[in-house]
Amino acid sequence: MFLTRIAKKDMRDLLRLYFIMGSNNCQSDPKHVLEQAIKGGISLFQFREKGNAAFSGEEKYHFAKELQSICKKHMIPFIVNDDVELALALNADGVHIGQDDESAEAVRRKIGDKILGVSTHNLLEVEKAIAEGADYVGIGPIYSTETKVDAKAAQGTKLILEVRNKGINVPIVGIGGITSENAAPVMKSGGNGVSVITTISLSADPAKSARELKELIDSLG
Ligand code: TPS
């Protein structure tokens, strides 16, 4: 999809409402949840199939392909969490990695100009991710989250502020326990968007929950 690295401006726009989901984050059909989330206005999607009863192998590939085709139909870029080989096999739009995965540098070499995102928890990790070729960084957990089993303690928006106070203009998405009730400080401290799982994936009305978040983010400029 991309012939050059994504421009910062385009990356910032994609991060505004970044939905992440895997099969075990849903109580109803994930394909339906994704369709509804798109209807509500998400700007980017991450396929994150891990943890309890997650699909693997062929099943994971086919499930990813189904969700990718929904994203394609609606022109929502499709990012794969952790699994570089899957991202390449699907010709996904990008990869998101954590600190325990392969280095950003190694992943950048494998994926060429696809989007690369890295989870970060302090200034050094942010600077390293940028130097190694990240297109954006995820900062969190902003609030406490039960969705990620190995999540660190909630840190609020202080790292986002620290990065911006240093004059670093990397595209930033905040993550961890975010809902439409508490998303505003992420944007006000210099985040370019919010990334969420539960508030959309387990909502009784995912389209409505996504729309509420989108309206809030749009109202903040
Ligand atoms: C863009 N991560 C940190 S907290 C969390 C995850 C998956 C759980 C959020 O769920 N940044 C990006 N992608 C990632 N996968 C991570 C960080 C890692 P909830 O919204 O239910 O609290």
Image (cartoon, grey):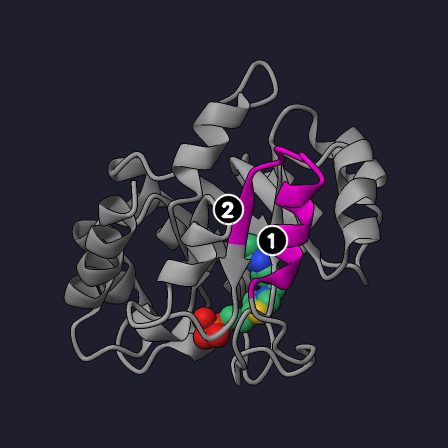
Tell me the residue at 39%/34% (across/down).
13
Which mark is drawn over residue 190? 2
Specify start and end residues of the magenta stretch as a single range: 157-173
Q: Residue 110 is drawn in which quadrant?
A: top right
Q: Is mark 1 on a helix, strand or loop?
A: helix
| Image height of 31 relative to 167, above or below | below
| Image height of 7 relative to 150, above or below | above
Q: Return the x and y of residue 70 as percentages of the image width and height.
A: 29, 47
Q: Are marks 2 and 1 in contact (CB under 8 Å)?
A: yes
Label 1 environment density (alpha carbons within 10 Å; few <14, some 14–19, many ≥20): many
Q: Where the C terminus falls, by quadrant?
A: top left
Q: Return the x and y of residue 152 as percentages of the image width and height.
A: 70, 77
Q: Residue 150 is drawn in which quadrant?
A: bottom right
Q: Can residue 97 be seen in this view?
A: no
Work out whether residue 58 or residue 187 is closer to the camera in this orientation and state it. Answer: 187
Q: Return the x and y of residue 148 as percentages of the image width and height.
A: 59, 78
Tell me the residue at 57%/70% (across/down).
156
| Image height of 61 relative to 95, above or below | below
According to the image, label 1 marks what residue?
160
| Mark 2–mark 1 distance (CA, rounded to whole Å) | 6 Å
In terms of image quarters, where does ligand 1 lie?
A: bottom right
How many numbered badges does the structure rendering display?
Answer: 2
Q: Is residue 131 magenta?
A: no
The residue type indicated by label 1 comes to Ile
Q: What element carries label 2?
A: loop
The residue type indicated by label 2 comes to Gly
Between discs 2 and 1, the one toward the N terminus: 1
Work out whether residue 64 or residue 188 is closer to the camera in this orientation and state it. Answer: 188
Extreme residue in the front direction: 165
